[in-house]
C-alpha cells in the first residue's frame, strides 16, 4: 500500500490555517478539549480492529497492548484534565497580590510520528497536545503505510479540522513542514533525523521534544534468577522483531552465567515461536526491505567478527531475521556501535559490576537501562552511578506503560518527556501571573 502524499505546495497554507485557528482561542476551554479527546477516543474505540489489522499488515505484529495503551492514555486526560491543568497559586510581594503559575497552551504543534508503533507514537502525543490546549499538524511515518492510511481516515472522520490536520509524505514533505514556524515540534525516531529536526527548529527558536533511542543495556548480576531474566530478555527482544527503541540492545553478564542465559533465551524463543521461527505465522517481520538489508549486512559482519551461538538466518523475501545470540563481543565490534533495532542479541562478558557501569558510562546515555538483581545495594549503585532516560529493575520496558512516570531520554537518547502530567507540561508554557489591585498602587 502507498499513502497519498500531501502536495508540498499545500503545506504552508495548512500550517497558516492551523495557526489562525489557534487564535480563535477555542482550545482554551477545558470542555472543548474534552470534546476533542472524546472524539479521539471514539476514533480509536470504533476502529480498534482496523488498527490491529493495519499494524499486522505493516509489521506482522499480532494484537497486543498498543491500542489499549492509547485508550488508557486518552481516558486519563479526560478523567483528570482539571487537575492536570489547574494553576498553582504562590505568594506575592504584598499580601493583596494575586500570584499564580498558569499553564498556557503553546499554540500549533508539529508531531512527527514513528513507524514501529505507528498508532501509539502518533496518537499519544496528539492527545497530550490537545489536552494542553494546542492544535496539531501530524506527520505520520510513510514507512508504515497501512497505519498511516488508516490514521489519516480516522483523523479526517472524527476530529475537528481546526484541531488536527494530517500531512502525509516522505523526506520532501517533512522538509517542507520543518521550514514552517511551529510553536513546538515533537519528534519520535532516530538520532540522526533528530539532529535534522533540531537544526531546523533552531532557525525559529522553536522548542523541541525528541524521543530518540540508543543502545539500551541490561546488567545481569549473580544476585538474580537467571532463567527469569533470560525469559524476560528473550521475550522483549523479539517484540516487534526487535524494532523497539526501548528493547534490550546488549547484555552485560558474568561469564559463568552466560550459558544459562543463552539456553534460557533459546527455550523462550522456541516456546513463543516453535522450533523454527521462520515457519511461525505470528513471528514479526522487519518493516521494509531497506531495514532488512541493513540487518543482513550487520549479520554478515557479526559472523566475521563474533560467534553466532544461535540463529543468524534471514530471508529477504519474507523480511525475516531469525532471533540471534552473539558472543565473543568486544566494545569495538560493529554490533556495539549503533542501535541494532532488530532481533540480534549480543552478550558481553562482564564479571564485575563496576566494569559494567564503566562500559555504560563510556557510551552515549541510553533511553533505558535495565538491571536484573535482588541486591538492593547493587541496584542503588547502578542507579546512582549511571545516566539514562529511565531505569527498570527486574523487568523490561514496563516503565513506559506507567503514565505516572515521565518517558523520555537524556543526551543522545532524547530531549524532553511526556505521558500523563508530563505531556501537559511539555505542551504548555508555565506563565507567571501577578495581579495587583489599583487600590494598592
Image: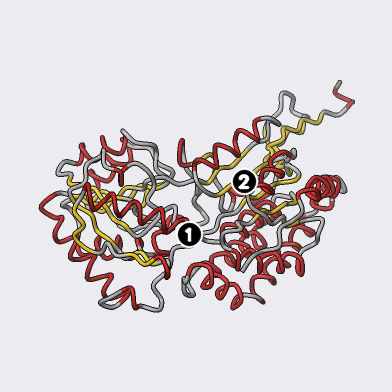
Where residue 127 sits in the image (x, y, percent)? 66, 57
Picture quarter containing residue 238?
bottom left
For residue 104, above or below residue 122: above
Circle 1: is it few (<14), some (14-19), or many (20+) Cα within 10 Å? Answer: some
Image quadrant holding the N terminus, namely bottom right
| Secondary element at image label 1 | helix
Q: Find the distance from the CA under tag 1 to the CA under tag 2.
A: 19 Å
| Colour setting | secondary structure
Report whether 116 appears left or right of 295: right
**What residue is rendered at 78% in x and 56% in y?**
163
Observer-side mark, 1 or 2, equals 2
Image disc number at residue 215: none
For label 1, the residue is 401
How many numbered marks are there?
A: 2
| Secondary element at image label 2 | strand
Quick one: which residue is furthest to the left in this view? 256
For residue 372, above or below residue 322: above
For label 2, the residue is 186
Circle 2: is it few (<14), some (14-19), or many (20+) Cα within 10 Å? Answer: many
Q: Which of marks 1 and 2 is nearer the N terminus?
A: 2
Tell which of 166 and 390 is nearer to you: 166
For residue 239, above or below residue 203: below
Tell which of 407 and 414 is nearer to you: 414
Report whether 363 appears left or right of 190: left
**What residue is rendered at 46% in x and 41% in y?**
413
Where residue 93 sits in the image (x, y, percent)? 71, 23
Amino acid at each position: 500500500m502507498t499513502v497519498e502524499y500531501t502536495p508540498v505546495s499545500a503545506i504552508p497554507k495548512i500550517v497558516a490555517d492551523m495557526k489562525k485557528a489557534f487564535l480563535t482561542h477555542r482550545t482554551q476551554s477545558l470542555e472543548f478539549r474534552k470534546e476533542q479527546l472524546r472524539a479521539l477516543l471514539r476514533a480509536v474505540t470504533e476502529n480498534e480492529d482496523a488498527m490491529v489489522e493495519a499494524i499486522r499488515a505493516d509489521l506482522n505484529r499480532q494484537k497486543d497492548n498498543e491500542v489499549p495503551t492509547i485508550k488508557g492514555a486518552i481516558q486519563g486526560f479526560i478523567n483528570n484534565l482539571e487537575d492536570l491543568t489547574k494553576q498553582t497559586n504562590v505568594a506575592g510581594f504584598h499580601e493583596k497580590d494575586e500570584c499564580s503559575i498558569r499553564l498556557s497552551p503553546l499554540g500549533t504543534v508539529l508531531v512527527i510520528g514513528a513507524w514501529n508503533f505507528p498508532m501509539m507514537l502518533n496518537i499519544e502525543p496528539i492527545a497530550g497536545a490537545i489536552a494542553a490546549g494546542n492544535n496539531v499538524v501530524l506527520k505520520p511515518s510513510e514507512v508504515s503505510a497501512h497505519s498511516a492510511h488508516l490514521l489519516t481516515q480516522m483523523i479526517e472522520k472524527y476530529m475537528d479540522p481546526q484541531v488536527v490536520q494530517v500531512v502525509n509524505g516522505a523526506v520532501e514533505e517533512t522538509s517542507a513542514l520543518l521550514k514552517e514556524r511551529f510553536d513546538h515540534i515533537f519528534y519520535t525516531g532516530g538520532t540522526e533525523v533528530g539532529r535534522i529536526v533540531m537544526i531546523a527548529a533552531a532557525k525559529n527558536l522553536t522548542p523541541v521534544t525528541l524521543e530518540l533511542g540508543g543502545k539500551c543495556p541490561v546488567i545481569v548480576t549473580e544476585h538474580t534468577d537467571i532463567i527469569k531474566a533470560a525469559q524476560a530478555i528473550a521475550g522483549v527482544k523479539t517484540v516487534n522483531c526487535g524494532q523497539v527503541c526501548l528493547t534490550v540492545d546488549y547484555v552485560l553478564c558474568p561469564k559463568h552465567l552466560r550459558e544459562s542465559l543463552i539456553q534460557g533465551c533459546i527455550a523462550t524463543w522456541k516456546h513463543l515461536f516453535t522450533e523454527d521461527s521462520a515457519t511461525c505465522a505470528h513471528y514479526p517481520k522487519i518493516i521494509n526491505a531497506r531495514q532488512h538489508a541493513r540487518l543482513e549486512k550487520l549479520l554478515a559482519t557479526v559472523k566475521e567478527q563474533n560467534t553466532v551461538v544461535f540463529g543468524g538466518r534471514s530471508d529477504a523475501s519474507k523480511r525475516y531475521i531469525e532471533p540471534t545470540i552473539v558472543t565473543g563481543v568486544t566494545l569495538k565490534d560493529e554490533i556495539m556501535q549503533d542501535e541494532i533495532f532488530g532481533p540480534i542479541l549480543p552478550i558481553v562478558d562482564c564479571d564485575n559490576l563496576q566494569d559494567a557501569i564503566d562500559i555504560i558510562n563510556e557510551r552515549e546515555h541510553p533511553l533505558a537501562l535495565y538491571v536484573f538483581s535482588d541486591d538492593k545495594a547493587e541496584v542503588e549503585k547502578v542507579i546512582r552511578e549511571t545516566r539514562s532516560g529511565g531505569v527498570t529493575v527486574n523487568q523490561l520496558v514496563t516503565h513506559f506503560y506507567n503514565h505516572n512516570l515521565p518517558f523520555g531520554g537524556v543526551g543522545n537518547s532524547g530531549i524532553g518527556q511526556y505521558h500523563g502530567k508530563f505531556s501537559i507540561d511539555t505542551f504548555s508554557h508555565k506563565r507567571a501571573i501577578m495581579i495587583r489591585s489599583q487600590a494598592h498602587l
